[in-house]
Amino acid sequence: MTRRTAIVIGSGIGGIACAIRLQSLGFDTRIVEQLDDVGGRAYVRRAQGFTFDMGPTVLTVPHFIEELFSLERDVAMLTAPDFPDDVLGEGQRILSGVSGGPNTSRYLEIVPILPFYRIYFDDGSFFDYDADPVNVRAQIARLAPEDLDGYDRFHEAARAIFQRGFLELGYTYFGSLGSMLKVVPDLLKLGAVQPLFSLVSKYFKSDKMRQVFSFEPLLIGGNPLKVPAIYAMIHFVEKTWGVHYAMGGTGALVKALVVKFEELGGTVQLNAAVARIEVEKRGGSASRPA
């Protein structure tokens, strides 16, 4: 039987993850990348002896990464493998000093970060943000005690958005415009379509707390004043699975994923810009610029 082939355009983390899955499903997969190295938005730049991660630097759902490193040739894994029992705490949050999972750890080291972030303000004060509700409330009480009740209400709003927007819709296939429009009423009801900063401002009076609970989209290049409030789910994503760092930077994760992809038999072609995409259909064909 002739093996199927697949070409993935772009070697960002999403492209590499897609290519790994295709390769594990039995496709002969090739990644084409126009730059001189892999990474996409996670590209690594080196200059005068220094190394710079050009994109994201933190990881938030390590079991998704573990799933990729657990895939094998011609074997489709539908669920991520379990982490060892001594790694996970209540709510399945990573607690140990190693958060990469057994298969990830064969390729690179991922460690949890605590606190998740230290947010500095222009008056010299700071906020240490983590998943401990007691600590978070203590930080709010120290800087903006008037916002303690608001935090409780925001926490519940973020929980609802996380439940619908991540745990449910995150595993839903949207194959048509109609299937996407069906979920709009739910998102409107949750307030997840309005700007994130507008949602946060409903619950917090202090400018500092409004910044603390809306800044995460900046990590992926999003403006809290413009991105939809569905990004409030990040609060619960971090609270549930923690914040993690790949030792050696995000570039180390990219390189490890490429190693996994090539072990499965996939290939990567650099300096290969795509000029156009040709689409063949029954009864004719079409092409368009890439």
Image (cartoon, rainbow, N blue to C red):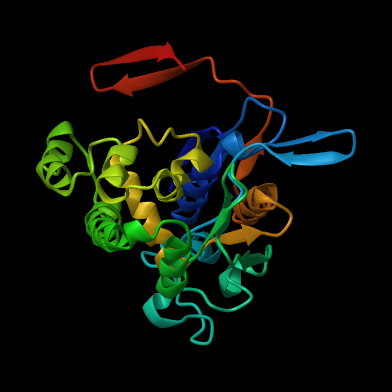
- Res 60 visible: yes
> Is 52 in front, or is 255?
52
Residue furthest right in the image: 48
Quadrant for residue 96, please give it.
bottom right
**In this image, 44 relative to 33: left or right?**
right
Residue 151 higher or lower than 201, as above or below:
below
Residue 199 image position (x, y, % from top left): 27, 43
Position in image of residue 210 (x %, y %): 39, 46
Residue 136 lies, with reference to residue 184, above or below; the image says below
Image x and y of residue 63, in percent? 47, 66
Q: Is residue 100 left or right of residue 92?
A: right
Q: Exactly how many numbered labels are in the figure?
A: 0
Report the side of 74 relative to 169 (left or right): right
In front of the other: 254 or 125: 125
* Residue drawn at x 67%, y 69% as measured from the top left: 106
Residue situated in front as seen by the camera: 127 or 194: 127
Residue located 52% across and 65% down the image: 66
Q: Residue at x 46, y 52 (%)?
A: 21
- Residue 192, horizontal then vertical, whole percent: 23, 44
Q: Residue at x 45, y 50 (%)?
A: 212
92 over 125 or under it: above or below: below
Quarter occupied by residue 183: top left
